[in-house]
Image (cartoon, helix red, strand yellow):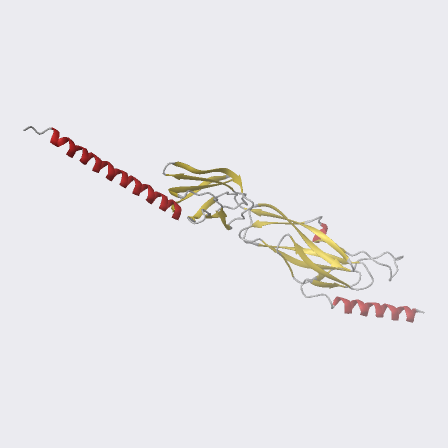
Amino acid sequence: MRTAARTGLVAAATALVGAVAAVPAGARTAAPVPLRAAASADAPASWTAAPAAGRPYAYLEGPAGSVLQDTLSLTNPGARPLTVRLSGQGAPVSFAARTVTVPARTRADVPFAVTVTADTPPGEHRGTVRASAAGREARVDLRLRVSGPRLAALTVEDVHVDTTTGALRYTLVNRGTTVLAPHLAVRAEGVLGTVLDRPGRPLPLTLRPGQRATRTEAWPDPPALDSVTVRLTATAEGAAPATARAEASFASGPALAGAAGLLLLAAGGGGYAVRRRGRSRTQRAPAGVRT
């Protein structure tokens, strides 16, 4: 009887050693997790994924442009090895191994890193570490705090007026460290006064730090014949107003033809008046001559 029991223990130990060898090099295994004696080897066991050290969520803090590291603990209380697939959501997460095989009754600690890109604005950010195995998915809350000063700065650049269609093309640039939701106001002054006046309104976009966005503003009824100065003013919460301008001359074919006709009429009318005035003087001259 003792010989049979001893043989069973040796076989179990041999199976456990073979399972540990299947864990990737990037993952560390902890001591086997004790199970209740009443649990059957074939009964389904609930595996878990959680931040190391029993924390309720993973918390990382650092400046933009840094790489922050933490550890995910995968616990397999079952009687068979468990293959877990890892991924990140809402944050650029990389793992020492994206697929980890956890031996039975064992915990594997898998290092992972979060890359904080240079354009990440300061403040609180959220993400998720996802682990899936055996038809189930577990999610670990990832909280990231990016340090650094908060600066809102916006510029308007490369303003151009299409004199054929009247379209206004411009580029908005986020020069600060916070995400901006810009507003835009447009005003155009011609020779005889204001020809376009659009108050500020929100644009359907947001700009991350360092991001550029080139947009086109329609002007369906530009002047046919005028010289205008167009001013674009962009604003965003916390940022100083940014203004840029462009000058353009509108001269359509019909407008030029009409203007030329008016000039010809004016010139013709002026010439006729001069000739008539000269003829009147000529007719009055003989009447004043005495014989």
Q: Quadrant of residue 224?
A: top left
Give the image location of residue 83, x and y in percent: 75, 63
- State whether residue 247 is above or below residue 134: above
Foreground pick, 243 / 15: 243
Q: Residue furthest right?
A: 1
Foreground pick, 38 / 265: 265
Give the image location of residue 96, x and y in percent: 65, 62
Give the image location of residue 149, x and y in percent: 52, 44
Foreground pick, 175 / 72: 175
Residue 31 in the figure: left or right of residue 4: left
Give the image location of residue 231, x and y in percent: 42, 41
Residue found at x 82% / y 68%: 13
Q: Residue furthest left?
A: 291
Work out which quarter of the rendered image holds the C terminus and state it: top left
Residue found at x 91% / y 70%: 4
Residue 65 in the figure: left or right of residue 242: right
Q: Residue furthest front?
A: 291
